[in-house]
Image (cartoon, helix red, strand yellow):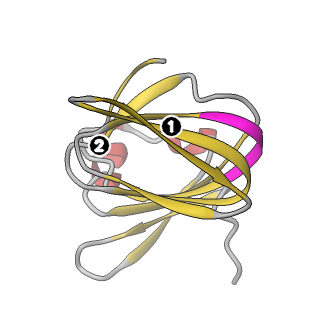
Amino acid sequence: MSIDPRQTYVLLGLDGTAVQLPGGAGFWQLSESELIDSGTGWLVSEYVFEQDWPTWEMHPEADEFVYLLSGAATLYLEYADGVREIPLSGNGAVIVPRGIWHTAKVALPSRMLHVTRGAGTQTRQA
């Protein structure tokens, strides 16, 4: 059975299991305990961005793999010595280190695949 990672996220459990979760808005409608559980493994999700991200985010538990599938965007990573810009177009990937605040500005509508442990994720306005 084929999975559309925009509509169905996959949680890769630390025990080797793979659990399907609702994607998109459905993910954020999960109960608090289900959201907490989703942070214990590696969450694989895809997003379509037509506008700049409205927030910065930071994952304290693990690095994040961000893979641009199509389009063009610039990722901004905030380090202690300043913000670094990483332009991506067509396809390409970035590993965002754990604990690093990051956001993106979209140059062309973009599809991105994300893999991270969501436990403790923090956000703030961009």
Q: Which residue is rendered at x = 31% and y = 71% of the image?
A: 13
Instruction: Say above or below: 81 vs 4.
Output: above
Q: Which residue is rendered at x = 72% and y = 47% of the image?
A: 72
Magenta stretch secondary structure, dominant? strand
Residue 114 coordinates in the image, percent (x, y): 50, 57
Q: Relative to residue 109, is residue 122 drawn left or right?
A: left
Residue 124 coordinates in the image, percent (x, y): 39, 19
Camera-side mark, 2 or 1: 2
User: What residue sits right under mark 1 in the picture?
Assistant: 28
Q: Label 2 to label 1, Cα distance in Å? A: 17 Å
Q: Secondary structure at mark 1?
A: helix
Q: Amino acid at mark 1?
A: Trp
Q: Residues within 10 Å of mark 2 (few under 14, many from 20)?
A: many
Pick the front one: 70 or 38: 70
The answer to whether mark 2 and mark 1 are in CB contact below 8 A is: no
Instruction: Say above or below: 113 vs 120.
Output: below
Q: Relative to residue 46, is residue 75 drawn left or right?
A: left
Instruction: Say above or below: 123 vs 77.
Output: above
Q: Secondary structure at mark 2?
A: loop
Q: Earlier in the sequence, mark 2 or mark 1?
A: 1
Q: Amino acid at mark 2?
A: His
Residue sticking out furthest to the front = 81
Residue 104: image quadrant is top right
User: What residue sits right under mark 2 in the picture?
Assistant: 59
User: What's the magenta region?
Assistant: 105-111
Residue 32 coordinates in the image, percent (x, y): 33, 37
